[in-house]
Image (cartoon, helix red, strand yellow):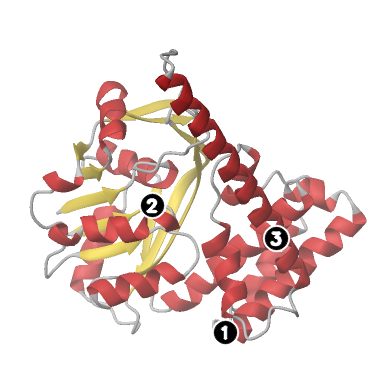
């Protein structure tokens, strides 16, 4: 069975490297510049115990050779439309697509494009990031993947995919309630990302202040109420688990959204927080989520403006014959 991983960033690169190291038939769909980098250095995962260097097959979109059994989509939200067009030739009648994007609206796009039988519901969890050289940094060991059909059914094909994707460091399960699991992951990302970004600290730093302790719990409550309002209610036991996790003193936990914000990279505030606020009937009952979203939107506008200004300056320097400017390391890497 063949696996196509679309995107060699923090998530796709991590999973692709572990699958390749476990002997799976893995192809990474990347852009030309990323392929050159990976061909030279390999797909590097830096871990506390040392480096893992994998060498999966690398492909550009126009080079995809036939159908794949599993396609893992690991691109940012703004890259979804392009990625969906690129994988059309790789999707056959038995292909299953497992998205690893943030938020929920990408499921609507993929189900409309490929159908419910191909585009599965999924929850992918791993704590990784990229360094300035494009290497994957493992911030916490292991990854979890849960996937399932929208009707809750299962079959031998799903089990074959579960066995294919399961390997050392990756725990894989089939869910008969994947819609609920999607809601619960969305709640975690909304609440943690909003709290980190609005209060500018990790969970431990937030809880070190009495007002911070109250605010992070209120943000969680607003997220739950918003999901209830759009008919995607999370389970009470999971909300309680998140409440306890967000109350942990000394915790260094942060969201990927906040880590990217701190590093000056592009952030995915729209599919994580913006989409939830856009779906509720009235955003006024969610003042803390609205404030967090505004904080993120203001940051992203300023970041994009700086990038545009720097790009214009670089073009002017090139026209004047100056040396080629250094690559902007805050650009992020996903393909």
Q: Quadrant of the N terminus?
A: bottom left
Residue 186 in sight? yes
Residue 30 is situated, as x and y percent measured from the top left of the image, at 27, 41
Q: Residue at x 56, y 79 (%)?
A: 279
Residue 169 is situated, as x and y percent measured from the top left of the image, at 40, 45
Q: Between tags 2 and 3, which lies in front?
A: 3
- Give me the C-alpha separation between circle 1 and circle 2: 25 Å
Name the residue tied to disc 1. 230
| Marks 1 and 2, the one that precedes in the sequence | 2
Mark number for residue 294?
3
Residue 75 is situated, as x and y percent measured from the top left of the image, at 38, 52
Of residues 274 and 38, which is closer to you in this image?
Answer: 274
Residue 63 is situated, as x and y percent measured from the top left of the image, at 12, 44
Contact? badges 2 and 3 (CB < 8 Å): no
Contact? badges 1 and 2 (CB < 8 Å): no
Name the residue tied to disc 2. 75
Q: Residue at x 38, y 54 (%)?
A: 79
Disc 3 is placed on an element classified as helix
* Looking at the image, residue 203 lies above or below residue 187: above
Badge 2 local density, few (<14 within 10 Å), some, or many (20+)? many
Residue 329 in sight? no
């Amino acid at each position: 069975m063949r696996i196509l991983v679309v995107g060699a960033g923090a998530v796709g690169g991590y999973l692709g490297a572990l699958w390749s190291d476990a002997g799976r038939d893995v192809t990474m769909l990347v852009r030309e510049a990323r392929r050159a980098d990976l061909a030279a250095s390999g797909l590097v995962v830096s871990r506390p115990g040392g480096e893992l260097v994998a060498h999966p097959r690398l492909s550009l979109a126009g080079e995809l050779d036939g159908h794949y059994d599993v396609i893992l989509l690991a691109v940012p939200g703004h890259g979804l439309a392009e990625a969906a067009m690129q994988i059309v030739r790789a999707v056959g009648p038995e292909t299953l697509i497992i998205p690893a994007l943030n938020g929920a609206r990408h499921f609507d796009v993929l189900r409309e494009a490929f159908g419910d039988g191909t585009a599965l519901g999924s929850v992918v969890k791993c704590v990784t990031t990229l360094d300035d050289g494009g290497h994957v940094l493992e911030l916490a060991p292991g990854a979890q993947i849960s996937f399932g059909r929208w009707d809750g059914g299962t079959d031998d094909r799903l089990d074959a995919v579960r066995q294919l994707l399961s390997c050392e460091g990756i725990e894989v399960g089939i869910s008969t309630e994947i819609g609920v699991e999607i809601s619960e992951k969305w709640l975690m990302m909304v609440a943690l990302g909003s709290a980190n970004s609005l209060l500018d600290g990790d969970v431990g730093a937030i809880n070190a202040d009495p007002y911070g302790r109250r605010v992070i719990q209120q943000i969680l409550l607003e997220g739950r109420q918003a999901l209830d309002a759009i008919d995607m209610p999370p389970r009470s036991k999971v909300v309680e688990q998140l409440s306890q996790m967000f109350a942990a003193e000394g915790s260094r936990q942060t969201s990927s959204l906040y880590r990217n914000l701190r590093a000056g990279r592009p952030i995915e505030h729209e599919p994580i927080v913006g989409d939830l606020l856009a779906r509720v009937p009235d955003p006024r009952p969610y003042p803390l989520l609205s404030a967090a979203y505004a904080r993120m939107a203001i940051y992203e506008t300023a970041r994009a403006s700086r990038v545009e200004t720097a790009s214009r300056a670089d073009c002017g320097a090139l026209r004047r014959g100056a040396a080629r400017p250094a690559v902007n390391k805050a650009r992020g890497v996903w393909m």
